[in-house]
Amino acid sequence: MAAAVAMRSGGCGSLEKQMMDSGKYVRYTPEQVEALERVYAECPKPSSMRRQQLIRECPILSNIEPKQIKVWFQNRRCREKQRKEASRLQAVNRKLTAMNKLLMEENERLQKQVSQLVNENARMRQQLQNASLVNDASCESVVTTPQNPQRDASNPAGLLSIAEETLAEFLSKATGTAVDWVQMPGMKPGPDAVEIVAISRGCSGVAARACGLVNLEPTKIAEVLKDRPSWFRDCRSLDVFTAFPTGNGGTIELIYMQMYAPTTLAPARDFWTLRYITSLEDGSLVVCERSLNGSGGGPNAATAQQFVRAEILPSGYLIRPCEGGGSIVHIVDHLDLEAWSVPEVLRPLYESSRVVAQKMTTAALRHIRQIAQEMTGEVVYALGRQPTVLRTFSQRLSRGFNDAINGFNDDGWSLVGSDGVEDIVIMNNSTKKIRTDADPSDALSVPGGVICAKASMLLQSVPPALLVRFLREHRSEWADYSIDAYSAASLKANPCSFSGLQPTRYTGSQMIMPLSHTMGNEEILEVVRLEGQALTEDQAVLSRDIHLLQLYSGIDENAVGSCFQLVFAPIDELFPDDALLLPSGFRVVPLDIKTDGLASSRTLDLASNLEVGSAIHRTHGEPSSNEYNLRSVLTIAFQFPYETNLQDSVAAMARQYVRSIVSAVQRVSMAITPSHLGPNVGRSLLPGSPEAATLSRWICQSYRYHLGLDLLMCAADETGESLLKMLWHHQDAILCCSFKVQPVFTFANQAGLDMLETSLVALQDISLDKIFDERGRKALYSEFGKLMEQGYAYLPAGLCLSGMGRHVLHEQAIVWKVLSEDKNVHCLAFCFVNWSFM
């Protein structure tokens, strides 16, 4: 026992000390250490046999006992662990030091701002006291701001003057008090996300500021941020027209940039700017930018007709190196997006600093932090793909979807004649050629092009995250798999025609396999497999599955200014890096900023809308339509390849298909409005079923009647909605199954829906036998007689299958008969205790 205590208290050198005290301490020669290090590199923890083999194979170790070799490896592992821990603590210390510096600077800036406000308050008070002694004209002269004389931007000297002024104004925004910054709601720095985000209050245009610590060198950060199309999803292009050095070692660039419009209802933006790259005396690197006067900069006038010229006010990046590595980055984005040029309902998108902060400012900061993690090897993605490859796929999906929504003329898009109803816009692009897979270098093309059908609609009181999540998880509710099969087949070597498709039946089930995700899971890249079955025996051996590459973003409903979208494209099962992508999908953009209200974890319930309607009264405390009046714009765009002789038929099919999707989305939107959510979720289950509150009472009463115990704590004192809430939030998965020849699930609490990875809508399509494996079904059948006789039964630990095909392990399952008021068996209830995914 004393020896054991000594080992614990002595640390990694305790065994070595004991060996030294007993006179058996060994000092290894450099050759012996080198031999041991070679073995350690291959196997840090060799077995007893391996250590004996090492002594036999290495003559220089023959005079060392196996026990001493064991001690050496133990000490070597301990030193390695200490070295890694010391390195980690040093990194944490550097991070905390940089964070402390950042917070001290922010505190100093806020103190300056307070002092400035106090002085302004004193001046205003003095003016009010002197108001009776001066006329109104003198007061007006006090608040009048003289206009700066316009500088000549046609020569290098004038550009340098503009650049220096831009630098000064940018620094005053980044670290000074030129803008009244307020902390962005919902954005709080944490130990693993060192960032401070603020938005403007009371300044012209929209502005946002972010600062944080990034584990990259300043030059690398500047290189990444300058390449705006690589991280800013709304940036279509950025062209440097002219670049020349300045006398102080800096660089001036004249840049033309184009930005996508987020919906089909607004025109795109373009910018003509000056960018100034220079270094400060303290070693900081600055990249600042501002718009130049005039509208003549950029491409020819014909190309610019589809854009509204917007303005970038002094903005940019201040990158300061940290001691020991890494950098502190300050990012400022200050824009005037010309909100007058869009319909009034869309103007909040162009007048909100929160939107700029989420889509542009924090996106830049998180992108460089993501790259820093990838470069250090902290991020490992599925399928062995490199992070840069998967990031490129995400960018191509987003860019292709934006191209489809905007339909620029210089990309080859043109309008197709309408059928008289202007709800769906059809565009044709005959310049997009679909290559065959036979020989990519040959770049053969199918004669034809691409048809795009798109539409936008205003949604009222529909939670965007909930809508997009439903569209992702329940594709069968809105998609036509035969059209998915057409799009998938048309991208392969065979001609893209309906006649080329083999007869196939699709089960409606899908399997979602994640590939990669951004920091905080704001955006997830995944592969979706739609299962298909051949209708003929000759084709049964061939796979009929459809594979989609899918980009899912905007998971968190409370993420202010987020863009919620689901974008996908058919892809070959082999998933080549240069795969051709024709993205389609949905985008929901909130127009009203509201962070309170419904959480994105709410369950999706279509049944409550379809079967209950207005008959359900709203309970006390449930949000009304006035309390949660969130407006958003939904944009739908679907692309279809076509052969030249099939252009008209494909256009008609695309128009009709998108119309059917719009109808499906309207039905879903009606079902998931706040008036049909909350504690009333699942009030109506199947035709003839009781309300959820009544069913919850039957479940608890029957459990107490059969087992003599309470399913819920304090359930005896609870009734109605309060009992339903307790059942809904119970930690164990509780599911109800209809007592019929074909048992199907009719109700589940939140844990039950999470376990089955489904919703109340899809739950009703899951039969009892689908979730149990063969062993579980045998256990259920063996206990069925006892269940019928005594009213309950215990099932042993086992495995279940979720609706997504994942294995679920549970420690125990309890099943009991749920009795109605007249003591008739209404359904069976299951409670899965301590379940978890394998």
Image (tube, rainbow, N blue to C red):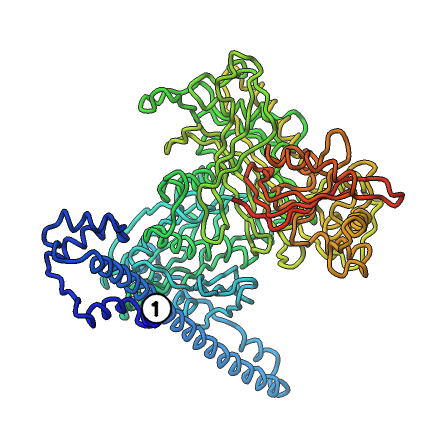
Q: Position of residue 228 (x, y in %)?
A: 39, 49
Q: Of residues 144 and 785, which is closer to you in this image?
A: 785
**Residue drawn at (22%, 59%), measured in percent from left and top?**
67
Query: What residue type is disc 1 on?
Result: Ala
Task: Estimate how packed mark 1 is, as few (under 14), some (14 to 19) or many (20 or more) residues with alpha carbons within 10 Å.
Answer: few
Residue bearing mark 1: 4
Q: Is residue 364 left or right of residue 616?
A: left
Q: Is residue 656 left or right of residue 4?
A: right
Q: Position of residue 564 (x, y in %)?
A: 56, 46
**Residue drawn at (51%, 53%), measured in percent from left and top?**
337
Report how many numbered discs are placed on residues in the image: 1
Q: Position of residue 304 (x, y in %)?
A: 45, 41
If the image is split into quadrants, where does the N terminus sit?
bottom left
- SS for tag 1? helix
Specify whether residue 110 is in view: yes
Q: Looking at this rendering, what residue extends furthest in the right direction?
A: 822
